[in-house]
Image (cartoon, rainbow, N blue to C red):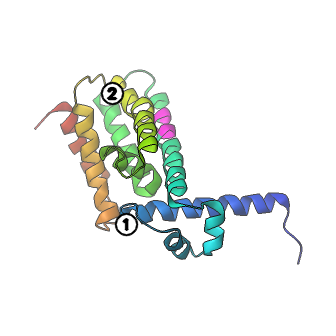
Amino acid sequence: MCPRTKEQNELIRMQRREQILDVAARSYFRTGGSFDIRDVAREAELGYGTVYHYYPNRHLLIEDVLDSGFERCEQALAEWVNNCGGSLDDRQLLTYCKALLRLWQSDARAYLVYKMAAEHYAGLPERDRNHAKRRFMERLYVPVQSIARREDDSVDHMLAVLVGCCGLHYYAGNSDLDVDRIARLAMQAITKES
């Protein structure tokens, strides 16, 4: 048997880390963030020592879950802005709502960013909470609010519809979301149509 190369070891390390982060994000929904490292290890089918090597405590793990979720959400926003080409109307905003729902449906970490934002990051320690709130506002919320040209709380309503409906996917175990219908409901919230 040939020993693994440095590159192979790095790839395995990255895959394990991703596996741990995915399991931790899903565990957060089941436990409200009070999961144990042992629970994550068991669900990820990894040894406790392996997971502990990467994350010696739950707070560091949640911090990394959120950080990677933020990166994915920020990337989705940047892609949407680039695709809009500067001319935004309600159709482009509807497209963004659909893109967010699809991202969240496939990526628990990205959804957790918005879910926790809706709860003002209450599950985090104070110093982490303030940092997460500021990052969310500056990098995700304010850009959408300014692009959508909405100064009122209509973006809050739009996001509340999206977060709430996507929650059914994670909390109720619904496998598929009606992305088109939910996005239209979210647009009704932002345009205040009935």
Indicate the secondary structure of the residue bearing disc 2: helix
Q: Residues within 10 Å of mark 1 (few under 14, many from 20)?
A: few
Asked which quadrant contains residue 186, the reply is top left
- Image side of residue 38 versus residue 188, left or right: right
Relative height, residue 153 to residue 44 (above, below): above
Q: Quadrant of the C terminus?
A: top left
The N terminus sits in image quarter: bottom right
Secondary-structure class at tag 1 = helix
As drawn, which residue projects farthest toward the right? 2
Q: Position of residue 47 (x, y in %)?
A: 62, 75
At x 37%, y 28%, the residue is 142
Majority secondary structure in the magenta region: helix
Q: Position of residue 66 (x, y in %)?
A: 48, 49
The amino acid type of the residue labelled 2 equals: Gln
Q: Earlier in the sequence, mark 1 or mark 2?
A: 1
Whether 169 is drawn above or below 78: the answer is below
Question: Rounded to the nearest whole Å, what is the CA distance between mark 1 and mark 2?
Answer: 32 Å
Q: Amino acid at mark 1?
A: Thr
Return the residue at label 1.
31
Q: Is residue 117 left or right of residue 151?
A: right
Q: Indicate yes or no whether the magenta region holds residue 78.
A: yes
Quarter of the image for residue 159 reads top left
Rendering coords of residue 12 (x, y %): 71, 63
| Residue range highlighted in magenta | 74-79
- The residue to which callout 2 is attached is 145
Placement of 117 over or under 191, stated as above or below: below
Along the viewing direction, whichever of 184 and 140 lies nearer the viewer: 140
- Residue reaching furthest left? 194
Question: What numbered label is drawn on residue 98?
Answer: none
